[in-house]
Image (cartoon, rainbow, N blue to C red):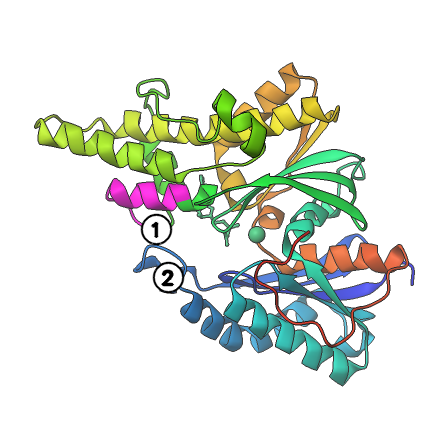
Amino acid sequence: VAEPLVLGIETSCDETGIGIVRGRTLLSNTIASSMDEHARYGGVVPEVAARAHLEALQPAIEKAVAEAGVALADVDAVAVTSGPGLAGALMVGVGAAKALAVSLDKPLYAVNHLVGHIAADILTPDAAPLEYPTVALLVSGGHTSLLLVRDLTSDVVLLGETVDDAAGEAFDKVARILGLPYPGGPEIDRAAAGGDPTAIRFPRGLSRASDREKHRWDFSFSGLKTAVARWIEEREAAGDDIPMADVAASFREAVVDVLVTKALDACAEFGVPRLLLGGGVIANRRLRDVALERGAAAGVTVRIPPLSLCTDNGAMIATLASELIQSGHAPSSLEFGADSTLPV
Ligand code: KG4
Ligand code: ZN
């Protein structure tokens, strides 16, 4: 089918996303988030997320269909994130997608969440089509991954990922240390205003020469989190005031620096003059600015989809399936299940 009408379901973390696309045209993208329910725990609680998906799915599907101005029966295919993500949360989406595909008698496409994030970029109305190869950096509360994309539908290689906390998780945990609410990213951004990013030299994880062999493209943020906690403890023990803006700005700089450095190093290593950013942490203005600035200096074009397509959503899942359909990929058999560690 040229320009297939696809409904995509995304439930890998705390967002219940339903998106409808026709080919590469976005028709609707509804998102129900259980973020507020997780706030008092300081992070996403898997059980709470799964239950919230169960409650949010049916109304979200109805809303997405209404907003798209299509009839559910006209959908050419159903797409769903089968992994990676939270097992219980994924299972709710996969179950719903199978039920929907069977009841509509339409093909079902199980897709990878990370590759979905990359697909979000081709929905950008005024952007040129995705050029290959491209390096992709995906940073959210659940993942921090560096990928080499030679073809969206058939050749995506995971170069590296975080060995402990995700970048967004680091923002959330350090916010907690600083006494700021969840989610921590925007809070740290606010706290960093006017701060000196060079005030404190916090560690850049896995960036030593000795890390090159095994972890060249991997990330680590738990040492950074510990360094911030220790720095504050020491000042407090000495009875000193904590320069919040400097701490927040220096922490943010450490995260941004290591993300951008490794992404641009990968561009250089693989001779790729293109970098695509995705994931909720892209909301960070400093990250976008440093990536654009250092990208330009390195001759790398940096693409950043609009934030509504960077955070987890159903439209990116529908778009990936739409590309799979148009490149002749067969649908998934109904035997597949949710896979919390699904490889790309
Ligand atoms: O992609 P996303 O909306 O959802 C999941 O990870 O599921 O990303 C949310 C993450 C949170 O960890 C949040 O703290 C982080 O993105 N985040 C930010 C900013 N806004 C959101 N991190 C840094 N700076 C921001 N401005
Ligand atoms: Zn995601």
Main secondary structure type of the part rendered in magenta:
helix
Q: Residue drawn 54% across and 36% down? A: 218
Q: Is residue 125 magenta?
A: no
Left/right placement of residue 52 relative to residue 261 reads: left
Mark 1 and mark 2 in contact (Cβ < 8 Å)?
Answer: yes
Closer to the camera in the image, 158 or 85 = 158
In the rendered view, tell whether residue 256 sits above or below residue 342.
above
Q: Which residue is mark 1?
A: 182
Q: Give the magenta part as a residue range.
A: 170-181
The extreme left residue here reads 239
Q: Residue drawn 51% across and 28% down? A: 211
Q: Quadrant of residue 274?
A: top right
Q: Which residue is mark 2?
A: 38
Left/right placement of residue 53 relative to residue 306 reads: left
Asked if the beta carbon under badge 2 is closer than 8 A to the nearest atom of ligand 1, the reply is no
Closer to the camera in the image, 76 or 223 = 223
Residue 343: which numbered mark, if any? none
Going from N to C along the chain, the mark reached first, 2 or 1, is: 2
Question: In which quadrant is the N terminus drawn?
Answer: bottom right
In the rendered view, tell whether residue 29 sits above or below residue 245.
below
What's the CA distance linking mark 2 and mark 1?
Answer: 8 Å
Q: Position of residue 29 (x, y in %)?
A: 64, 60
Name the amino acid, label 1. Tyr
Asked if the beta carbon under badge 1 is closer than 8 A to the nearest atom of ligand 1, the reply is yes
Q: Secondary structure at mark 1?
A: loop
Q: Position of residue 307 (x, y in %)?
A: 57, 44
Name the amino acid, label 2. His
Q: Quadrant of residue 230?
A: top left
The extreme top residue here reads 297
